Image: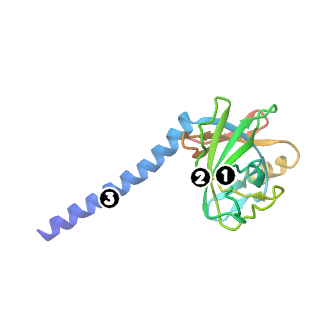
C-alpha cells in the first residue's frame, strides 16, 4: 500500500507542477493575444547574457518617472517605500506612449480610451522630496532576448535611429513585450507560447 501511495503522491505533485506552469504560460499568452498595445522608445545598454544568449536591455521612456507625476505622495514622505506603482500612459503625436500621471498602488479611476495603465514596482529609498527628482519603477520588461548573433548589430543600430518595443497590457496593468520595432518595422515578435 505504501508504494501505491508514493506513486499517487508523485503523480499528483507532477500534475500540480504542470498545471502551475501551464497557468503561467496561458496568462502570458492571454496578455499578448488580447492586451492593449503600447509602443515605447528604447535605448541600448548591454547585449549578452552568458546563460540565455543575446538580449537587449530596454532602457525605455518610462524607465524613470519624475516624482512630480505621482499624485498621491503622502504629506511628509521623504522616500519611497517598497511598493507597487501604477503609471498612466498616453499616446504622443509620434506614436510613442508617454507617462502622464502615476500613483502608489492602484489608479483612482480607470484609464480613458486613449490612455493605458502599466503596473510596476518601486523599491524603497527613492527620493520624492523634490519635483525635479525621478524614480525608476520596475515593470518586468527590462530585457528582450534575440536570436544568437543578433544582439550586437541591433544595439549598434539603436545608437543611430529610433527603436521601440510594442507592449501588450492586461486590464490590471501587467505588461508583456510583444515585439521589438525598428521605426514602423517589426524586427522580432514574441510567440504566444
**Residue 97 x/y as whole percent:** 74, 38
Kindly give the residue lying farthest to the top in the view shown: 113
Q: Quadrant of the N terminus?
A: bottom left
Q: Which mark is residue 158?
A: none
- Kindly identify which residue carries mark 2: 105
- Kindly identify which residue carries mark 3: 14
Judging depth in this view, the residue of 67 and 180 nearest the camera is: 67
Element type where label 2 sits in the image: loop
Closest to the camera, between mark 3 and mark 2, is 2
**Residue 41 x/y as whole percent:** 77, 43
Judging depth in this view, the residue of 183 and 113 nearest the camera is: 113
Q: Which mark is residue 72?
A: 1
- How dense is the environment of label 1, judged by Cα within 10 Å: few (below 14), some, or many (20 and up)? few
Kindly give the residue lying farthest to the bottom in the view shown: 2
Judging depth in this view, the residue of 93 and 44 nearest the camera is: 93
Q: Quadrant of residue 111?
A: top right
Kindly give the residue lying farthest to the front in the view shown: 75
Q: Quadrant of residue 167?
A: top right
Say left or right for 69 vs 10: right
Amino acid at each position: 500500500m505504501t508504494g501505491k501511495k508514493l506513486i499517487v503522491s508523485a503523480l499528483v505533485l507532477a500534475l500540480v507542477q504542470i498545471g502551475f506552469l501551464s497557468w503561467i504560460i496561458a496568462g502570458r499568452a492571454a496578455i499578448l493575444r488580447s492586451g492593449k498595445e503600447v509602443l515605447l522608445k528604447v535605448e541600448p545598454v548591454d547585449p549578452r547574457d552568458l546563460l540565455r544568449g543575446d538580449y537587449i536591455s530596454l532602457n525605455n521612456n518610462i524607465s524613470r518617472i519624475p516624482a512630480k507625476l505621482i499624485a498621491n505622495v503622502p504629506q511628509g514622505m521623504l522616500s519611497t517605500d517598497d511598493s507597487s506603482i501604477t503609471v498612466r500612459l498616453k499616446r504622443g503625436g509620434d506614436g510613442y506612449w508617454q507617462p502622464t500621471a502615476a500613483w502608489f498602488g492602484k489608479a483612482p479611476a480607470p484609464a480613458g480610451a486613449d490612455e493605458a495603465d502599466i503596473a510596476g514596482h518601486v523599491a524603497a529609498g527613492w527620493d520624492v522630496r523634490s519635483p525635479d527628482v525621478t524614480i525608476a519603477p520596475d515593470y518586468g520588461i527590462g530585457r528582450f532576448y534575440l536570436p544568437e548573433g543578433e544582439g550586437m548589430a541591433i544595439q549598434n543600430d539603436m545608437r543611430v535611429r529610433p527603436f521601440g518595443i510594442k507592449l501588450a497590457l492586461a486590464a490590471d496593468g501587467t505588461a508583456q513585450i510583444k515585439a521589438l520595432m525598428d521605426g514602423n518595422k517589426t524586427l522580432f515578435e514574441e510567440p504566444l507560447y
